[in-house]
Image (cartoon, rainbow, N blue to C red):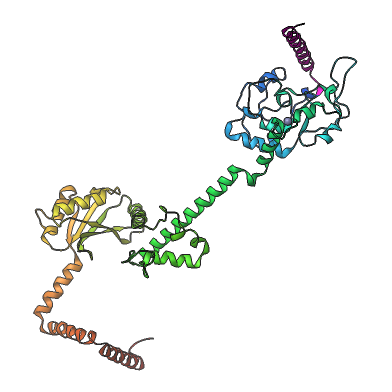
Amino acid sequence: MGKASQQKIDLVSKRKRDDDMIGFEEDPSPMADQPLPMLEIEQPHPESQDEGLHANEPITFRGVEFLQRDPGLRPQIWQHPPEQRDSVRRAYLMLGPMQPELQTYKPSGEKGHQRRFQYKWFDNFQKWLEYSEDKHRAYCLYCFVSSKNENRRGGSHVFTVDGFDSWNRINSGKHCAFLTHMGSGPCSPHNNAFTDGQALLNQSCHIKTIMAVKDKEKVERNRLRLKVSIATVKWLALQSCAFRGYDERPESKNKGNFLEMVELLAEFNPDIAKCVLANAPYGSKYTSPEIQKEILSIFACKIRNHIREEIGDSKFSILVDETCDVAKREQMALVLRFADKGGILQERFFDLIHVANTRSLTLKDKLSFALTNPGFDIQNLRGQGYDGASNMRGDLNGLQALLLQECPYAYYVHCYAHRLQLALVDASKEVVSISQFFQKLIYIINTVDSSSKRHDQLHQAQLVELENAIANANIET
Ligand SMILES: [Zn+2]
C-alpha cells in the first residue's frame, strides 16, 4: 500500500472518529440542560455552541464573577475585545484550573474498550489539567489562556477548543498524551504558554504594569512641579513682589524671588526637592519667564471671569486713568463700578492695558476690546469717570464723547478725587494760612527725612505727646 493511500485511509478513519464525536455531543448530558447561573455572557444555542466559539462574536468581559468556568463552554480569549484580553487571561489564571471531583466520569471510546477520566490525574498535572463537566473532555488552562490563533491548525486546538477524550492514551509511560502535550523541551508550546501565564500573573513584574507605575510616578512628579510654580506665582502676585532676578543662573547668589521661593519650598519638602529645578527633566522645569507669565495670565483671566460673573448683565460704570510703569510704558488702568445683588456699590480693579499712545481713539479701541472680550455689553454702560485731560473729557473727540456715540447713557463724570486735588491746590494758593501750612509741612518733611537722628527725635516727641494725651484722657486706649 502506498503512502498516499495510507493517508487517505487515515483521513477517512479520522473523519469517522470526528463524526462519532459529533454524535456523542449531540446526545446532551443532563448537566448541559441545566441553566448556568454564573454565566451572563450571551451563549450560543447548545447545538450550535461549537460554531459559536469560533464565530468571533464580541464578548465583553464584565468581571471575574461573570466568567464561564466550564472549559468546554467558555468563549475563547480571542473572542474578547483586544483591550480586555489580558484582564480575561489574568482572571482565568487567578481562578485556577477547573478540576471537578465527580462520582463517576462519563466513559468514552468504542464499546467494550471504553475508558473514563480519573480524578487522580489532576494530582499529576495539577497546574494545568482541566475537565469539562459539559463536554466530558480534558483541557489545558495555560494553553487556553495563551491561545491567540483562531485558525485551526493540526491538533493545536485539542486542549484549548476541542477537548481531549482519548483516555486510552493516558498511561504511566512516557507516551502518555498529557506528557506529550506538555512537550519535552522548555520551549514547547505548552511550556511557553505556562511561562507567559506566570508572567501575566506576576503583576509587579509585568512590563505593562511597570510602565504604568512609571508613567503614574512621572505624571505625579510633573503635577507637583507645576503646583510649586503655581503656588509661587500666586504668593508673589498676592504680595506684589517682583518675580525676576538680575542674575538667574544656577550659580547666582540671588536668583530672584521666584526661583528663590521654589528653592525654599524644596528645602522643606523632600518630595518637591526631588522634582524641581536641577532635578527636573530638561525642557519641563516650569520655571521659565514664559511659564511664569502664562500662570499669571491664567490667574488674571480667572479673576476677570469671576468679576464678569459678579456683574452679570447689570448696569455698570468705568473709571479709567493713565499711568506709566517703571519701564516708562504707557498704561491704562480700568476699574469697574457696579451694584451687587444686595444693592451695595462695589468697585473692582479689572485690567491694566498697555497703550501705544494716549490719543482718545487709541484709548477707546483698547477700552472697547477690554470690555467686549469678556462679554460685557457696552449698552449697559451708565457712567464714565476720568480726569480732566482734554483727550479724556473733550466734548468732541475725547474718550467720553467717543463712548457716548456708542452708548448714549454712559454719562461722563469728572473724577471726584481729581477734582478734590484741584480744589486743594487752588485753595492753598488763595488762602494764606493754608498756603503757609503746606510750605511748613514740606519744610518739616525735608528736614526730618534727611537725618535719621532727627527722625528719631520726632518719633520721641510723638511718643511724649501720645503719653500726655492718654494721661489727660484726650485719647481712649
Ligand atoms: Zn498546555
| Location of residue 242 (image quadrant) | bottom left
Tell me which residue sits at (74%, 28%) in the image: 71
Tell me which residue sits at (69%, 38%) in the image: 195
- The answer to which of 475 and 364 lies nearer the viewer is 364
> Residue 120, image x and y in percent?
87, 33
- The answer to which of 198 and 8 lies nearer the viewer is 8
Is residue 306 left or right of 180 when viewed as pictured?
left
| Location of residue 342 (image quadrant) | bottom left
- The answer to which of 71 and 187 lies nearer the viewer is 187
- The answer to which of 418 and 363 lies nearer the viewer is 363
Is residue 214 left or right of 314 when viewed as pictured?
right
Q: Main secondary structure of the magenta part?
A: helix
The magenta region covers 1-30
> Residue 463, image x and y in percent?
33, 90
Residue 8 falls within the magenta-colored stretch: yes
Q: How many tags in the picture? A: 0
> Residue 395, image x and y in percent?
10, 56
* Residue that extends furthest to the right in the rendered view of this protein: 112
Q: Quadrant of ligand 1?
A: top right
Tell me which residue sits at (19%, 52%) in the image: 409
> Residue 447, image x and y in percent?
20, 87
Residue 194 falls within the magenta-colored stretch: no
Quadrant of image for the N terminus: top right
Residue 37 seen in the figure: no
Residue 471 seen in the figure: yes
Quadrant of image for the C terminus: bottom left
User: Against 147, is 453 above or below?
Assistant: below
User: Against 253, is 191 above or below?
Assistant: above
